[in-house]
Amino acid sequence: MTRVHAYAAPDATTPLQAHVIERRDLKPTDIQIEILYSGVCHSDVHQARSEWGPAIYPLVPGHEIVGRVSAVGGQVSRFKVGDLAGVGCMVDSCQHCDSCAEGLEQYCENGATWTYNSRERDTRLPTHGGYSTAIVVTEGFAVHVPESLDIRAVAPLLCAGITMFSPLNHWKIGKGHKVAIVGLGGLGHMGIKLAVAMGADVTLFTTSQGKADDALRLGAHHVVLSTDRAAMKAARGRFDFIISTVPSGHDLNPYLMTLRRDGQLVIVGALEPVGLSGLPLVGQRRSVAGSNIGGIAETQQMLDFCAEHGIVPEVEMIRMQDINEAYERMLNNDVKYRFVIDMAAYRAEQEQASD
Ligand SMILES: [Zn+2]
Ligand SMILES: [Zn+2]
């Protein structure tokens, strides 16, 4: 076991604090990654606070992980020491169900092993995420991070990026499609960048006029204020595809009315009930779906796509010690558009302190 510096939530109500965790010894197919950057996702806050059911404490959040491979097991074939590697929301899955066989490990019928707040399949030991200076993971659940991308900004692609890429990819969005993204946050801003790079005509739905300029700067072609009834009426029947990133329960019906016949609305944010009337569905054969991150192969495909198109998230770097303040700011929508923890700096501080 290797002792590793981390930040953990001790329980549902105490702020995160410095903590030491143990990483397992390398199995033959494992790689160890020295973590350089770790993105901060909304779900980190929800899980640290047991808002999605009782969490496993102490809880080390973080599932947007980028670092350099620092050791490899004897049977590792895809990575070597020094490679830039990423880990997203999953670190394992059953590997034999139909979903796993299709490379859709996120939908593993026996339950994927999540990067944190989950249990390893063999030892049942809790998994710990990226708010730590190193992680050990089986190479099959790590991805290659292209060296051409800005590595300080790349981490959020591993959750926010793939969450938006997967539905756009699955529903084959490209040139000639009219796409709308609902909400401009960590997910929404990635949706705009990716859909634009895929060649779609992209609209942002927002409740906040203040976000319009930002959306256009990020590449959106149009902005519709969803509180403007006349604008919503004018948008009826316009879109082929809509992704809603709104994190809480919301009324889907006004957005459904803006889909063309056979259009899809995909939910990626809300886990709470959403308002849904049959009328807009039946009237134009529209459909509503949900989508959760992407498989490992698709995550690699997304990173390669981002490298080809020069896409990285808009990020604000923070120190590990400032994570609790970052959570408050994130809950107040006061971030453009994703916090990334400088774990390299944190490791350097810890090493200096122990000298
Ligand atoms: Zn996430
Ligand atoms: Zn499976």
Image (cartoon, rainbow, N blue to C red):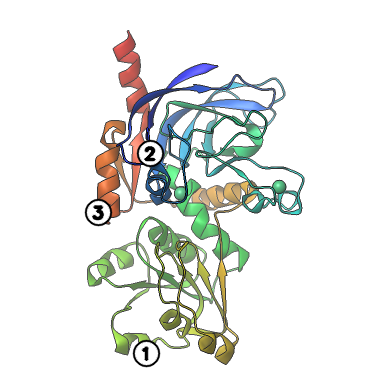
Residue pointed to by mark 2: 152
Q: Amino acid at mark 1?
A: Ala
Residue pointed to by mark 1: 234
In which quarter of the view is residue 93 placed?
A: top right
Judging from the image, what secondary structure is the residue with disc 2 in? loop
Whether 245 is drawn above or below 278: the answer is above
In which quarter of the view is residue 92 placed?
A: top right
User: What separation in Å lies between label 2 and label 1 (alpha carbons)?
Assistant: 41 Å
Judging from the image, what secondary structure is the residue with disc 1 in? helix
**Dot 3, how many residues are within 10 Å of its Cα: few (below 14), some (14-19), or many (20+)?**
few
**Dot 2, how many residues are within 10 Å of its Cα: few (below 14), some (14-19), or many (20+)?**
many
Whether residue 326 sits left or right of residue 47 in the image: it is: left
| Percent coordinates x, y for residue 246 in the rendering | 40, 65
Q: Amino acid at mark 3?
A: Asp
Residue pointed to by mark 3: 334
| Among numbered discs 3 and 1, the one appearing first in the sequence | 1
Whether residue 303 sits left or right of residue 245 in the image: it is: right
State whether residue 352 appears in this view: yes
User: What separation in Å lies between label 3 and label 2 (alpha carbons)?
Assistant: 20 Å
Residue at x-position 53% and y-position 77%: 176
From the image, state whether disc 3 or disc 1 is nearer to you: 3
| Among numbered discs 2 and 1, the one appearing first in the sequence | 2
